[in-house]
Amino acid sequence: MAVNETERRAMTRALELAALGPRGVNPQVGAVILSPDGSVLAEGWHHGAGTPHAEVDALSKLAPGAAGGATAVVTLEPCNHTGRTGPCAVALIEAGVARVVYALDDPGAVSGGGADRLRAAGVSVDSGEQADAAHAIIDGWLTAQRLGRPHVTVKWAQSLDGRAAASDGSSQWITGPEARADVHRRRAAAAAIVVGTGTVLADDPSLTARDGDALFAEQPIPVVIGSRPTPADAAIRRHPKPPLFYDTHDLHTVLADLHSRGIQSVFVEGGPTLASAFVAQGLADRVLAYIAPVLLGGDRLALTDIGVASIDAAHRLTVEEWLPLGADLLAIAHPVLGLEEGVA
């Protein structure tokens, strides 16, 4: 049964609801319950670990039996396991829901399989509606489920000829205010922001996410990688959240530890050396390249050696979006061996 226009509109609303939920170890999920005639019966979203999942949150707002013959539109496949809450697939079946439309499959070895359980109970199921939009909301959680590490976004700003700084090392500001504001919004959406000790020593960044002169309510945890000591008076030590320091260059170890702390998304803002290391090791799930219409020349490249000796070894990317930001242009891309293969 094809997804109809009413269900598409309901999915758009469910995605809005999902974004209301907090970042955390559980995915942000939204749900809309439609009556057989297509009117909205109830809405819900996941409010955090240990609280009812989106489907159950929506169903809780209905009288017993009111969901009979209804359609549940959900941003993630209803779960199929019992944790601190029961399986959402079972809750929908017991409520008498006749149809479920969801955006993304649940990749969890334990939590997945809800669609099969629903079909076995005679419920009509359709998947894939607005999957890209749903993926964007919970990409960190999906990567954590599939790879056991946080989702990694690597960001840099560059001139049109690929330089991150002028020959004397100055780099403020290559891009304009619109691009810088966009960076801060994306910082606020990440659980952690990562730099190397070189950036800390050279620039003394605060690594906060700011809306103009004010701090965003959500702040990323600052993370510093490298063996050189961070000065006691460094701005990063005054961050609203205590920084994490890793005296290692082993990025896999760092990401594994961040994952163990429940951190599911990181925003890499270090200089060319750190950015290149993440790219070279295949750890960049998304790339943000802010491109300014200036020419700098010289040898201050935005990326250094990423292990590409020939064109056949190039890191191929799929561009998700070209976003104009004032005079600048943001390229948002992910590795070809990423979303297409269901990795991240």
Image (cartoon, rainbow, N blue to C red):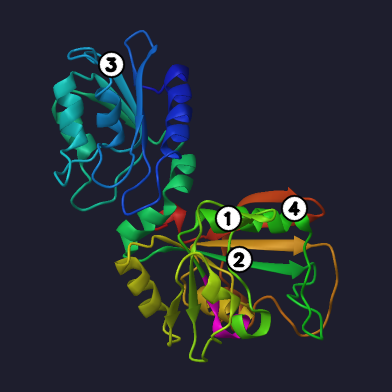
The residue that appears at 65% across and 77% down in the rendered structure is: 303
Q: Are marks 1 and 2 in contact (CB under 8 Å)?
A: yes
Q: CA distance from mark 4 to mark 2?
A: 15 Å
Tag 4, which secondary structure?
Answer: helix
Say which residue appears at 67% left-offset and 84% top-offset.
202
Q: Tell whether 213 sits left or right of 292.
A: left
Residue identified by numbered label 2: 155
Q: Which residue is mark 1?
A: 186
Q: CA distance from mark 1 to mark 2?
A: 10 Å
- Amino acid type indicated by mark 3: Ala
Q: Which residues are magenta?
A: 194-199
What is the x, y in percent for residue 138? 41, 48
Determine the image quadrant of residue 214.
Answer: bottom right
Q: Nearer the viewer, residue 328 or 46?
A: 46
Sequence-first disc among 3 and 2: 3
Which of discs 1 and 3 lies nearer the camera? The answer is 1
C-alpha distance separating marks 1 and 4: 13 Å
Q: Looking at the image, is 176 positioned above or below residue 35?
A: below
